[in-house]
Amino acid sequence: MESLISNVAYERLLAEIKQRIISAQTQASLAVNRELVLLYWQIGRQINERQEREGWGAKVIDRLAADLGREFPGVEGFGARNLRNMRDIAKQWPDASIVQQLVAKLPWGHNIQILRVTAGPEREWYAHAAIEYGWSRAVLVHQIETKLFQRQGRSETNFTRTLPPEQSDMAQQILKDPYHFDFLTLGPSSRERTLERGLLNHLKDLLLELGKGFAFLGSQYKIEVDERPYYIDLLFYHAHLHCYVVIDLKVPEFEPEYAGKMNFYLSAVDELLRRQGDAPSIGLILCKGKGKTTVEYALRDTNKPIGVSSYQHTLELPHPLQGEMPSIEDLADAIDQLKEDQEGDPTTMG
């Protein structure tokens, strides 16, 4: 028995030491990255100052790269291309305090990607977001390429009228317009079920596009009202808003009746699922397109918080071939339809 207790205590000690080592390694790595980024920024600033003061041309960077390569053989990071990155980043971030508080907290590769963003406020937004959400370089590139900054908070909503001010602003910011489902390849005749199946097959990509805080609860989530079943396309819980998020998928453009259906779903979710401490549930109607005035009129007198956004996806075939060949999703829909027809045909029953 003493041996067993001793083993348990030892395993606990080992786990604690391992965690301390990992934590120390992480801190050391962050410190090394910080010093490296600051060094690169300082070099870039020196190059800029000398070029402006002495009138040196671009060739000075090639000369510097060659001389530094001879002085520090085998040391990477001082090639002509990276020296130009140092110069450009120093131009983009001339304020040393901002560099300390923001730029130095990101890996150098992240900072190089943010070079692609020209507007100052947008550049700072991506840097803050990359730190807050822990984006990898690939995720950062994806967010820049899909213009997340311009899409954030652009959904048409009635939140200012249906939510308390402290929740309204945050709820508005978690929605986007349009949503980019580039990981989907849908044919021109796809249905809602096809869209839903595609999103579920790429759930990780969907959660990335939705943003931080969304917890997936289910698809075709069943609720019962008056002993009749209803099915919610996608149901989420948002960890920061502390509320349920109902998503209704629509292949056509927005129609006013979609708002009435979503209002019903939100009333049911608030009554059947919402618990003490939960904020009011919010709804998001995702459509292929929408008319701003139509959405405004449809949401004007609804009493539940609803947002309407469009989405974009990749076409499976080049335009001249669209409609000539069915997509895989279209074939799956056709099989589903055949099964439904057979189930409803009495001649197929044994």
Image (tube, rainbow, N blue to C red):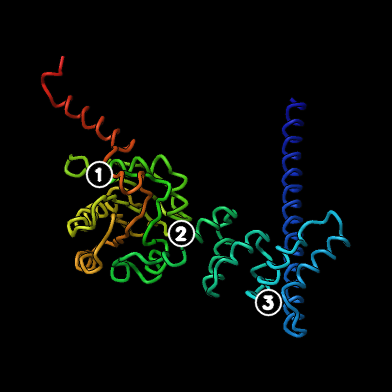
Residue type pointed to by label 3: Ser
In what element is the residue under mark 1? loop
Up/down of 124 relative to 340, above or below:
below
Would residue 272 appear left or right of 343 to someone viewing this image?
right
Which disc is residue 146 wearing? 2
Q: Residue at x 80, y 68 (%)?
A: 63
Q: x, y percentage for residue 172?
A: 38, 66
Report the amino acid beneath label 1.
Ser
Residue 259: image quadrant is: bottom left
Distance between mark 1 and mark 3 Cα atoms? 54 Å
Q: Which x, y percent locates residue 173?
A: 42, 65
Q: Is residue 284 depicted above or below 332 in this figure?
A: below
- Check disc 2 and give the amino acid type: Thr
Q: Position of residue 104 (x, y in %)?
A: 69, 66
Q: Residues within 10 Å of mark 1 (few under 14, many from 20)?
A: few
Marks 3 and 2 sit apart, C-alpha to C-alpha, by: 30 Å
Q: Earlier in the sequence, mark 1 or mark 3?
A: 3
Outermost residue to the left: 346
* Residue at numbered disc 1: 189
Say which label, 1 or 2, has the lower sequence index. 2
Q: Is residue 65 above or below residue 91?
A: above
74 sits left or right of 84 in the view? right
- Residue visible at 74% across and 55% down in the picture: 29
Q: In this view, which residue lies farthest toward the bottom?
A: 53
Calculate the distance from the C-alpha at mark 1 to the C-alpha at mark 2. 25 Å
